[in-house]
Amino acid sequence: MPDDLKQIIHRHWGERSELISILQKIQEQYGYLPPEAMQETASYLKIPDTAVFAVATFYSQFRFEPRGEKLIRVCLGTACHVRGADRFLANLKKELGIEEGETTPDGKYTLESVACIGCCALSPVLTLNEEVIANITSPKIRKMLIKK
Amino acid sequence: MKLESVKENASNEWYLLQDSRDPVIYVGTATCGRSAGALGVIEALQKDDDINNSRIIETGCLGLCYAEPIIMIKKTGRPLLAFGKVNPRVAARLVRDYLNEDKINNDFVLGTVGEERINGVGKLFDLPVLKPQVRRILNNCGFIDPENIYHYIANSGYSGLQKTLELKPDEIIGHVKVAGLRGRGGAGFPTWKKWKTARDEANKQPAANNESPAFIICNADEGDPGAFMNRSLLEGDPHSVLEGMLIAGYTIGASRGYIYCRAEYPLALSRLKTALDQMRELNLLGENILGTDFSFDIRIKEGAGAFVCGEETALIASIEGKRGAPVPRPPFPAEVGLWEKPTVINNVETFANVALLLKHGADWFTEYGTEKSRGTKTFSLAGKIKYPGLIEVPLGITLKEIIFDIGGGPSDGKKFKAVQTGGPSGGCLSSDMLDLPVDYDSLVQAGSIMGSGGLVVMDEDTCMVDVARYFLEFTQKESCGKCVPCRLGTKAMLDILSKITQGKGEEKDLNFLKETGAAVQKGSLCGLGKTAPNPVLSTFRYFENEYTQHVKENKCSGKTCKEMISYYVLEENCTGCTVCKRMCPQEAIIGESKEVHKIIEEVCIKCNICHEYCKYDAIEVN
């Protein structure tokens, strides 16, 4: 196990209530939760592996596969929905040739949906890594994909 | 440290800014401002040599999301002047023209702030979208730097806390009771009752060193899709919420608070962190706050993307590091909550209200609102509306005033069909209900709820069956799975709704939906399941004809359900430019250059791409 991973975990007090935030820190660093990281977390917090896995799978934020270089998250909030968000998601799936939660074979894009990012007044929106792209249209998405 | 000395420093800094000889440019950089390009505007301003003596201050959101990015310019002898829809290309010129030549570009100017006027420019707060609003909670949003605690303090921040520390807890509860403040998270439970229960329970706790006898939790898990009031407030004026938490902590005798904020709000989280650090520096957090016996600390807990964690018992489980599954109430968290200690959980806006009402008194608070729903309320206005944004209005205002007077009605001249209130727990109200006063009780009677304040407007091109399906898909995904009626009932309802939207619905399905909906309501433990059928039942109540149309005529009047619509080329508008043909991912469009095109229906997947690319309005949906 890489040292920095151990460091992330061991920086915490070791209380059960820190579980979610430890997992968040790991994902922040690695983009996903490697199995050995979850095992190390369990032993550090002195709880069974299954307890860590049960929590990790409950929350939609956590990913169990490495993510691509660019993470596209299509917002499916109500305001985005009434402005055609599901169509944009379907078109992106077709364009990238992957399903929700998957990564393109070249490791470039991961496609996800998100329940709502609270940017409803500028709907429909998606996020590309940290950046929020507002008022999306098919031409805008096309430009975004071409721009690399 | 006493607040008075801090106040002095804060006022000095604030007035230096107000009277600054160098120009000051305020740029709204909340999430909506940023997504509209505010950071690019700042970069453009900083690069311009002519105006780089100006100070740039980043603020929160003014609420006029439709006009983002918004900048406000202050120069000596002039009132603050607001400009909207500024982009990096025009920003520097706009500022230069105004600062150096007093030229105001009418295409971008929104208005002056305050009573002072500039010739030919109206007042910002006279804009139709702002005029009917009463801004109390949002008073600072857009005008102060949320990352500078002095700005908050100079605008009488923390004076509610100061007053609180001179009162006895029972007196504070009395004030909150007289004010009639009800929880802003949605259910509208009287805040004072929650506090009193928690205080009584906390008094029964055995004294233990270093352990808080009770806890305060701020619910900033704003999970309702289509709602962003809490995000805007935390990004624009975080201290107003934190002040309320301190007041609550003092009242119930807690020494620890948590703010549970969703991970989807990175900017709110970072501004909260900054706010807490600054509070610690000024002894507004920590031991013996402002020289009193009161000690309190606040920690941030980041949510991890589970809607059910907005439910208080699930939220507590999540803070404890567990799966967010609700447990039966009673006992209520105010009796047995976080780590089995009495715990007050209030919404972001409730805390902000507490700080205001302690500062100004209960009489001030009750100047607005109705008898049973006192005060003002923030709402986020989104969907198919002309002026989407964040607003604050007195409770009791009608839906019509909100949607048409403030929001400008549906966008693109379309006809209003419905407004969705209360998120997945709420319902859709039709145009017949536009005169309904917006208060806790009227909305429940109409088959919806106020919820935390998300209002999503729908026009004639929205299919209400699809909206019901959308919400059921959401609640089905978010159900924690603990109660069978919720876990399986939402799935069964979703299956039926999907069947109907796919054109395979039968008449018996409609009864099945109503019956299952009633069972899910009765048989679920927590609010998520109890209210999950609301979007279906309310659309039945107001839009039953759409359901029967889908089932009997295979028709979707909202032109949404793919199996019931078709795309075609409007021959008289088509110029044969071939754009749609080239963009169609299915190669479903044929036709030579400069000749009318045609869509092959059998191949078309109704992705709408041709419609979006066509510049001649030649693609129609039927």
Image (cartoon, helix red, strand yellow):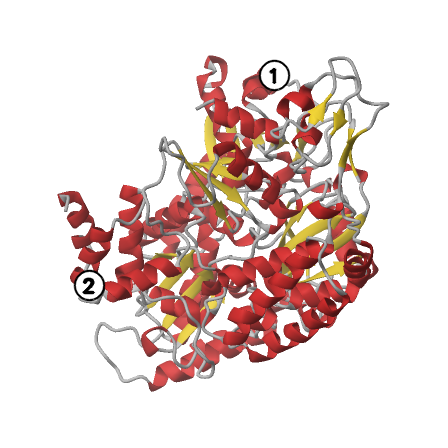
Q: SS class of the residue under badge 1?
A: helix
Quadrant assignment, res B215: bottom left
Chain bearing mark 1: B
- Is B412 on the left or on the right of A86, as rendered? right
In this orientation, which residue lies closer to the viewer: A127 or B545?
Answer: B545
Task: Mark 2: give few (<14), some (14-19) or many (20+) Cα within 10 Å.
Answer: many
Where residue B344 sits in the image (x, y, percent)?
43, 72
Q: Label 1, on which residue?
A: B97
- Is B178 on the left or on the right of B231, as rendered? right
In this orientation, which residue lies closer to the viewer: B261 or B169?
Answer: B261
Image height check: is B417 above or below B16? below
Q: SS class of the residue under badge 2?
A: helix
Where residue B218 sits in the image (x, y, percent)?
44, 63
Q: Residue at x 59, y 67 (%)?
A: B492
Q: Residue at x 82, y 28 (%)?
A: B570
- Give the label on residue B588, or none: none
Distance of mark 2 from mark 1, alpha carbons? 61 Å
Image height check: is B418 above or below A139? below
Image height check: is B571 above or below B554? above
Quadrant assignment, res A2: top left
- Is B306 on the left or on the right of B509, as rendered? left
Q: Label 2, on which residue?
A: A45
Q: Residue at x 26, y 82 (%)?
A: B207
- Is B469 on the left or on the right of B267, as rendered? right
Look at label 2 and name its amino acid: Leu
Where residue B222 sits in the image (x, y, percent)?
51, 57
User: Can see residue B23?
Assistant: no
Look at label 1 and name its amino acid: Asp
Quadrant assignment, res B325: bottom left
